[in-house]
Image (cartoon, helix red, strand yellow):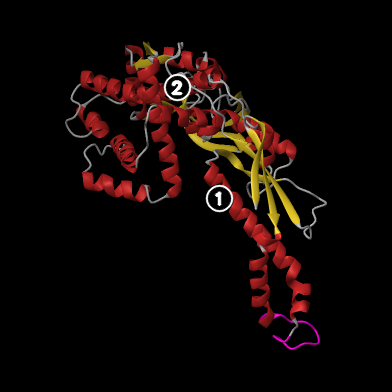
Amino acid sequence: MDIKRVAIDAVNETIVMNVVHMDYKGQVAKRINEKMPLAQVKGFRKGQVPKDLVEKQYGKAIKQEEIKKVVDLALERYIQSERLNLLGTPLPKVNEDFNWDAEELTFEYEIGLVPNFEIDLEAKNNIVKYVVTADDKLIDGQVERIQKQFGKAVPQEVSDAKSDLTGAFSSEANGINNTTTISVDTFSKKAQKQFIGKKVGDVVTVSTKGLFDDDHQLMDYLKVGHEGVHGLDVEVNFAIEAINGSEPAELNQELFDKLFGEGKVASLEDLKAKIKEDAEAQFAQQAEQKLLLDVQDFLIENTKFDLPAEFLKKWLQTVGEKKLTPEEAEVEYARSEKGLRFQLIEGKALAQSNIQITFEDLKEFTSNAIRQQMAQFGQTNPTDEEVQGIVARVLSNQDEVKRLSEQVVASKMLEIFKEKANPTTKEVTYEEFIAASYGE
């Protein structure tokens, strides 16, 4: 068998395989012999069919099966021996006039290659690493919300800026249907006006764009998935079922113990300090996520390389349970191209920095994430045995392993960038951070 590569350009090649009779005849003969005791042809008893009739009835199909096995194995070994770094999988070129009886059979496969490129992690950039602080305005507002949340509900006929509205967000066209209770002042200042002066039974139609200062709140109140939350701009209805004001709860030891555990907060000053600590821990996570997105955008924009776009569009038509039309593949490629580019950049950056992700890294990351989640629910001092038991259960799920591995890689990537690119650090309030994130 003769195998060679024909270059088309830097990221597209064709593998050409010439198969001759000697490459498959032995296996075909073996299969024919195995078939003879089982062959059934009218006029002959089972197992007594002459070999030429067996070959006539089954030979063509067996020959094609064995040639395909030979070709598939040779292709796999060739890719390994040549150490080809592929995008997608080889696509056989279709030949409508293919002659299986020819002395020499030629098979051609299109392949897309991972491009060669360099990345400069120390390139000049204008990326900002935000440190988000909880200012007095935010802390006082949170104290007020706590008093309201644990206070006494007072029914109202007409809503005002402090009212709690119970109702259902809905949009049939966008699959949104969620009943919730929300304070009018939770909405953005612009959106609040549409919810003031309303009565039970009223239906308010609003756009999701700008409904909240932080788009992530769409996940909480409309149950929109994280992947679709940014930039979502659709109309939803909010049908008001109840309107309540509140009589604020007294800030006393009973309330403090209920919120944080016995004796952990003993005064208004302690309460504000705790609110500041918890808020800034949450803001740090959001700031880290924004930094990662900004790094991704910067590296994609400043790392230029070609992808085998047309090959990948054809390949997308063949993978998955549902075969895609050329038009659907075009849309899917446009949707996934940015992610593919960053995946390649990310891998290159880790390799350049000699960083590998180990199972111990994954276990440590998962353990820290579980401890943070447990702390949010008031379990601040779990034992190592408890945590490791949960880690073992989580990592027994392959989908969770994949998801967490991606987060570990992203975390390592961010550390590399912060070390080498040295983004500018800027301290801001949460309002300033939201404005920087969403341009509001």
Vertical placement of residue 95 versus 248, above or below: below
Quarter of the rendering containing residue 228? top right
Image coordinates for residue 7, horizontal then vertical, percent:
66, 34
Q: Counting other residues with Cα less than 10 Å from the Cα at mark 1, is it few (<14), some (14-19), or many (20 or more)?
A: few
Image coordinates for residue 33, horizontal then vertical, percent:
66, 77
Q: Name the main secondary structure of what is drawn in magenta.
A: loop
Circle number at residue 290? 2
The residue positioned 22% from the left and 32% from the top of the image is: 257
- Which circle's residue, 1 or 2, is located before the other in the chain? 1
The residue positioned 68% from the left and 63% from the top of the image is: 65
Q: Nearer the viewer, residue 270 or 311?
A: 311
Q: Nearer the viewer, residue 226 or 317?
A: 317
Determine if the magenta segment contains residue 225. no
Vertical placement of residue 38 versus 210, above or below: below
Q: Counting other residues with Cα less than 10 Å from the Cα at mark 2, is it few (<14), some (14-19), or many (20 or more)?
A: some
Residue at the extreme right: 97
Vertical placement of residue 23 versus 287, above or below: below
Image coordinates for residue 322, horizontal then vertical, percent:
67, 48
Q: Secondary structure at mark 1?
A: helix
Image coordinates for residue 269, horizontal then vertical, percent:
22, 18
Quarter of the rendering containing residue 47? bottom right
Q: Nearer the viewer, residue 163 or 28?
A: 28
Task: Inspect the image, locate mark 1, and give the three-letter code of the amino acid beneath it.
Answer: Arg
Q: Is residue 241 visible?
A: no
Q: Is residue 325 visible?
A: yes
Task: Inspect the image, locate mark 2, and give the three-letter code of the amino acid beneath it.
Answer: Lys
Give the foreground label among 1 and 2: 1
Residue picked out by circle 1: 77
Tell me where the magenta segment starts and ends, as one range: 38-48
Left or right: 221 in relation to 365: right
